[in-house]
């Protein structure tokens, strides 16, 4: 993720939420360039999601229609926590015959993705300002995705906050629900203890097959500013991959 975990994290005294959320919503003002991109193309590329009770929730009766959103039927890749869109725009530019959906709760990150899209001249991305859990639970149709990518999710490195981590045993059925058989779940992190947790979760995930060890770095992911910072601090980037088995 191009935004640091510290930037997105809630204050330490925030009550623990019983429903797992993928990221903490963070607003912020848009730069002039971001605002210009938002005004120009948001109505085309940012999904107008009917809301429930909160600004990143999803109305119970809303289902994402990929054919309507993209105007075609093509392989669909989901990136959870797409941040400022560096990985997403790179992937879309390199794979014009594939569609990409980015979920991000940081509005300036979504706006910066639009800036990147305009600069790269790509139109095979759609964005949604929603949390991943309700999106995977009900917004996305079952077996509708070819890949799910989780790049550098918030590690919640303080022990008392680690129950908030996204990649847990409880998250597995949600990913399994939206991936087609043969679809791929890719993950990466630069926090070793979270990497260990991810590997354990994926290795025992029902309905998935994996190597049970670290995967080679995914060649389709560029080295973003965020990843470069982790490398500069001497952290090891861990990649993990699992494949959805037939039902």
Image: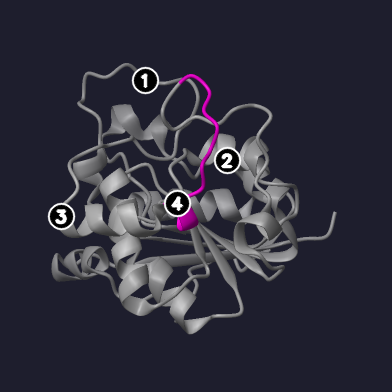
Q: Residue at x 29, y 59 (%)?
A: 37
Q: Nearer the viewer, mark 3 or mark 2?
A: 3
Q: Quadrant of residue 59?
A: top right
Q: Which residues are magenta?
A: 43-53
SS at mark 1? loop
Q: Which residue is mark 3?
A: 32
Quadrant where the C terminus is found in the figure: bottom right
Q: Nearer the viewer, mark 1 or mark 4?
A: 4
Magenta span includes 48: yes
Residue 1 in view (yes/no): no
From mark 1 to mark 3, how far is it between C-alphas?
A: 36 Å
Q: Which mark is residue 135?
A: 2
Q: Which mark is residue 16?
A: 1
Q: Which mark is residue 134?
A: none
Decide which of tag 3 and tag 2 comes sooner along the chain.
Answer: 3
Decide which of tag 1 and tag 2 comes sooner along the chain.
Answer: 1
Percent across and percent down for residue 151 are 41, 59
Q: Which residue is mark 4?
A: 43
From mark 2 to mark 4, how far is it between C-alphas?
A: 20 Å
Q: Quadrant of residue 120?
A: bottom left
From mark 4 to mark 3, how far is it between C-alphas?
A: 18 Å
């Amino acid at each position: 993720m191009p935004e640091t975990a510290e930037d997105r994290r809630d204050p330490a005294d925030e009550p623990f939420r019983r429903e797992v959320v993928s990221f903490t919503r963070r607003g912020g003002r848009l730069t002039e360039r971001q605002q210009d991109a938002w005004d120009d193309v948001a109505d085309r590329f940012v999904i107008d999601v009917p809301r429930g009770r909160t600004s990143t929730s999803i109305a119970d009766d809303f289902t994402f229609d990929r054919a309507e959103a993209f105007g075609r039927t093509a392989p669909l890749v989901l990136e959870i926590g797409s941040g400022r869109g560096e990985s997403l725009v790179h992937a879309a530019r390199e794979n014009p015959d594939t569609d990409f959906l980015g979920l991000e709760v940081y509005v300036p990150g979504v706006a910066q993705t639009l800036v990147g899209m305009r600069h790269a001249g790509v139109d095979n991305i759609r964005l949604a300002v929603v949390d991943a859990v309700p999106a995977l639970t009900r917004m996305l149709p079952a077996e509708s995705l070819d890949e799910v990518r989780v790049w550098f999710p918030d590690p919640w490195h303080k022990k008392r906050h680690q129950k908030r981590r996204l990649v847990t045993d409880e998250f597995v059925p949600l990913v399994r629900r939206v991936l087609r058989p043969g679809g791929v779940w890719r993950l990466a992190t630069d926090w070793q203890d979270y990497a260990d947790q991810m590997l354990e979760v994926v290795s025992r995930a029902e309905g998935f097959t994996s190597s049970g060890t670290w995967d080679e770095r995914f060649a389709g992911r560029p080295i973003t500013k965020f990843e470069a910072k982790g490398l500069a601090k001497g952290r090891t980037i861990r990649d993990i991959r699992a494949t959805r088995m037939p039902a």
